[in-house]
Image (cartoon, grey):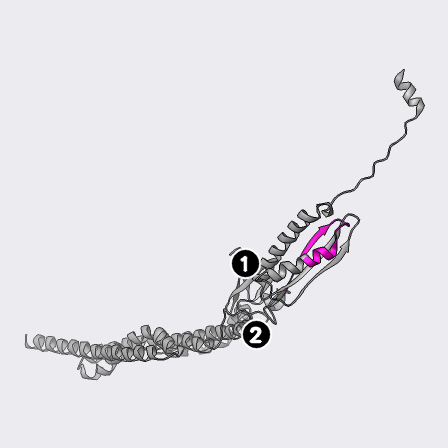
Amino acid sequence: MKALSWNLQEALWAAGILLLSSGTAFFVYLLLFKVLRSWASKTSSKLDDSLVKHSRAPLKLFFPLLGLWLSLPALQLPGELLSLLKHLIELLIIFSLAWLGIRGTYVAEDLVMSHYDLTAKDNLQARKIYTQVNVLKKITISLIFVLSLACILMSFEELRKLGLSLLASAGLAGLVLGLAAQRTIATLIAGIQIAITQPIRIDDVVVVEGEWGRIEEITLTYVVVRIWDLRRLILPISYFLEKPFQNWTRTEAAILGTVYLYTDYTIPVQAVREELGRILKESPLWDGKVWALQVTEATPQTVELRALMSAPDSSTAWNLRCEVREKLIDFIQRNYPQSLPRVRAELEKIPLNPGTLAGKKA
């Protein structure tokens, strides 16, 4: 009975120390974040806002665990129980540090991208930097995951012995894994190559597999293209290194748009050219740089008119082309309806044979 009372007192003492240490650590966490939030609200920098936003959750786990780990020597628990508890807390600390490291990559991304505006009209440099940062962030997260998993596994003595026992077959296993993962490794290398050479960037306008869309996401293994009608085209990242595709915003966002009209030979080209200039000058979609109207083809039935115009980006160019096409057709219909495409035919009177007429009368 005395031993039971002593064990109960010891357990209550240990529980009290655990609660006190974790509570104190949690109070330090709350105090720290109160100071950080107050500091962030008084500055115009985005770094402190991002730091508070991304580190809050992992540090909320880390501080109580740190308090528990520091209080372990004072618990006076049996050796096996103390060792088990210490190992469990160490595993959770590794997890929280890995979580904190992953959130730190988001802080670094926010810090870099705070100097660039992705919503700007001419956002070429911003998209270039964002693509590099996005791919590097994914690589860093993968490394943190692998390292933290390795630390967790190495903390188990049994797994460490198992690893030593497998060294004898490491050569054969490495060869098998290398052959099995050959395509995966090539894909990862292709992802890194895309980040460095940048044939595509986030928000680039591309025509791929006959579809027009924007690059929405670039991972280490695949690329997501957002099609104009909101479908998503998923392609392996190696596709953009092995097959040809169109990138409309490779060097700049500005683009030239074209509208083709087919009319009769009687169309007054100069009048249509002047109307095109008037339409563009009144349109807020035109960037004021380039416009022209030329006869680019002549068939036996029609002539082909090509209206050329510039726009700040591909989406604006699409809308401008639709506007110009609609207004030019309306202009021709109202002012020169006889110049719309038509089919001509020449009718000739064929004289009848008198003998045939006499036969019909008979």
**Any magenta on residue 271?**
yes
Q: Nearer the viewer, mark 1 or mark 2?
A: 1
Q: Quadrant of the C terminus?
A: top right
The one nearer the camera, 362 or 58, is: 362
* Residue 169 visible to an observer of this rendering: no
- In the image, is 138 to the left or to the right of 56? right
**Would you name the residue on which mark 2 appears?**
193
- List x then y, in percent, for residue 176: 52, 71
User: Is 128 placed above or below 232 here?
Assistant: below
Instruction: Give the number of marks.
Output: 2
* Foreground of the two, 210 or 265: 265
* Residue 273 drawn in magenta: yes
x, y percent for residue 228: 54, 57
Amino acid type, callout 1: Ile
Identified by mark 2, the residue type is Gln
Q: Residues within 10 Å of mark 1 (few under 14, many from 20)?
A: some
The kind of secondary structure element at disc 2 is helix
Q: Is residue 296 visible?
A: yes
| Residue 122 on image: x %, y % | 55, 71
Q: Which residues are magenta?
A: 256-274
Q: Which residue is mark 1?
A: 227
